[in-house]
Amino acid sequence: MTAAIQLKNLSFAYPNKRVLDHLNLQIQSGEIFGLVGPNGAGKTTLLNLIQGILSSHNHAITVLDSQPGSTIVKEKVATMFQDDLQINNVKVNEFIKLFAAQATHPKNPETVIKELGLSDIQNQLMNKLSGGQRRKVSFASAIVSNPQLLFLDEPTVGMDAETRQNFWRYIEKLRQQNVTIVITSHYLEEIQKVADRIAILQDGQFRYVGTWQTLQSHHDNGQFNFNTQLERSLFTHLPAVESATQTDANMTLISNDTDLTLKALLPFIDQLHDITITRESLESIFLEMTNKGDH
Ligand SMILES: Nc1ncnc2c1ncn2[C@@H]1O[C@H](COP(=O)(O)OP(=O)(O)OP(=O)(O)O)[C@@H](O)[C@H]1O
């Protein structure tokens, strides 16, 4: 696999404010990469540097083997920005065709309009669209250029549940076409599902870079829920169990090592019913790491 994006010791400051601090990273070609971090962590700044919208004045960034902002990169990279472009008196299909016309090897705009379910609104003026519809058109204008590398900054903000589902389905389709995708989002559940790897950025530094599964394996907290006629006292001293609460026949165990607790529960398994095990979500691990300064 080749690197689509490489950061080597990247630092960046706005006047009087240091935002990125010696970042190193490789994003592989064809990878879906999730960039998460609290408000103001530097995510948009990092994406703007990679895309050449901001200049870092050094050679810390390589994009598709070239410099950010170079013509070759511009031809192969597309972005769905956090803030939609405000354009009046242009119809949806005209808007998408404008982006296709600027690309070297565009997709067919009509096909993109159909695939993204925009047929019904294709003759509407851009300034008459709802927020969610504008997000869809914004996405269409990014992918119609047929990019090798796609940046999505908070892509699903304002989308309804069905649009969101279709959007992620389309991202899976782009994955099969080997498009490299970098996504920032505050909807961590979505990132958890779709990203091959994630980076957690905080105070200008990566707190974690790797797969979600590896991150989760270092955070073994979880909850067991089941129905049983057995006594609560049987469960309170099982390995890694922090608490056991009982309401009628329903028992809830909080464990700080779900694998260990699960093994200890096996001898009782015939007397435990409707068992559910809930591992910690990316969101709760993220909050733990970014709030407590855990490394
Ligand atoms: N043009 C600018 N000039 C000076 N400071 C800026 C500028 N743009 C952003 N900042 C500051 O840089 C820091 C990082 O901002 P950035 O927008 O990159 O964060 P972010 O992680 O994308 O945040 P969010 O999740 O809220 O979108 C913030 O403290 C912000 O106030």
Image (spheres, rainbow, N blue to C red):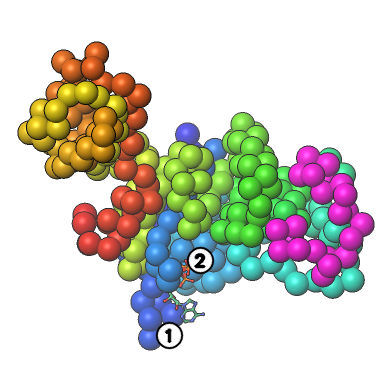
Residue beneath the point at 26% across and 21% down = 272
Q: Say if residue 58 shows up in the picture.
A: no
At label 1, which amino acid type do we have? Answer: Pro
Q: Residues within 10 Å of mark 1 (few under 14, many from 20)?
A: few
- Farthest-out residue, front: 248
Image mark for residue 174? none
Question: Type of residue at label 2?
Answer: Thr
Q: Secondary structure at mark 2?
A: helix
**Residue 269 percent location from the top left of the image:** 23, 17
Query: In the rendered view, does 108 fall on the left or right side of 146?
Result: right
Q: Is mark 1 within 8 Å of ligand 1?
A: yes
Does residue 73 sit above or below 191 in this rendering? Answer: below
Q: Position of residue 143 (x, y in %)?
A: 71, 48
- From the viewer's perspective, tell me whether residue 24 is left or right of residue 113: left
Q: Residue at x 40, y 64 (%)?
A: 38
Determine which of the numbered discs, if any, sits on residue 44 in the image: 2
- Labels 2 and 1: the sequence-earlier one: 1
Is 113 in the magenta? yes
Task: Give the position of the C terminus as an image quadrant.
Answer: bottom left
* Residue range of the region highlighted in magenta in the rendering: 112-134
Q: Mark 2 vs ligand 1: CB under 8 Å?
A: yes
Q: Which residue is mark 1?
A: 15
